[in-house]
Amino acid sequence: MANFQLMGMPVWVYAKDIDTKSTIVRTRLIEGHVGETFNIEPQEIEGYRFVSAAGVTAGVFTEEDMHTITFYYRHAEVAETEALTDKYLHIFSEVQPVVSIDDQTVTGQKLWPGTVVKAAQRMASRTGEFWYQLADSRWVKYDMKTMKLADNDGHNERPAADWQRPNNWQPVAYNATGVIDYISGAEVAVYAQPYGREIGRVAHGTAVEVTEMVIDSAQVTWYHVAQQGWISSIYVSLNA
């Protein structure tokens, strides 16, 4: 007489972008017989890094319980994102929004000088660039020469609050000298704090003194440059 093993309820495994909540690869269906164990690991996905998991990733197949696991990933070039409330971009000169950070196809009308648009989200790249998602889902790359971020919508004026990004890291003393290593003839932005408000620019080749260092949760190193501000370490060539 043949022995039949009952199949247990399956495990559904999803992989999603933690910032957009969109599915980034095909959903996996894991099956097994009743009584067998499962232990699901996040798969490697090109262009993304694993961040966190939601759901039971290890257990036993049963007849009653179906499990759902969601593995969250972040784009490899994204250091962090932040949802914004009551933040507006004031446009100084013509800006063309794009579909997304990955798909930089132009979309919709340009933003003309004098335009004020609500910003819904901010993304900081691992190279120190900032992108803003508008309320209509389009994206613009931040440039202090063409726009500024403010707390007012152009009608209801309020004092502009300094951007203070909550963080869990503490600067450590770090004494070094070096030069700004960017693009000949160009300037790179410096910030009030890592991923904070842009407070100025410093030219390629400028000699600098580093007084503090931070290594953030994305393993990006930031230097505090004396008399300037914070800058990603990739733009500073330290002296030996």
Image (spheres, rainbow, N blue to C red):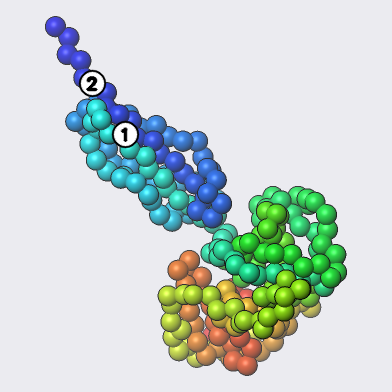
Amino acid under disc 1: Met
Position of residue 58 in the picture relative to residue 29 (left or right) = left
Residue 6: mark in rendering: 2
Q: Position of residue 195 (x, y in %)?
A: 57, 73
Q: Label 1 to label 2, Cα distance in Å?
A: 14 Å
Q: Considering the image in quadrants, where does the N terminus appear?
A: top left
Position of residue 28 in the picture relative to residue 158 (left or right) = left
Q: Which residue is mark 1?
A: 66
Q: Position of residue 80 (x, y in %)?
A: 53, 64
Quarter assignment of residue 109? bottom right
| Residue that appears at 85% across and 69% down | 113
Q: Considering the image in quadrants, where does the C terminus appear?
A: bottom right
| Residue that appears at 24% across and 40% down | 59
Circle 1 SS class? loop
Question: Crowding at label 2, few (<14), some or many (≥20) Cα neighbours within 10 Å?
Answer: few
Position of residue 10 in the picture relative to residue 142 (left or right) = left
Amino acid under disc 2: Leu
Q: Nearer the viewer, residue 223 or 108?
A: 108
On the question of residue 151 being in view, the answer is yes
Figure check: 212 above or below 181:
below
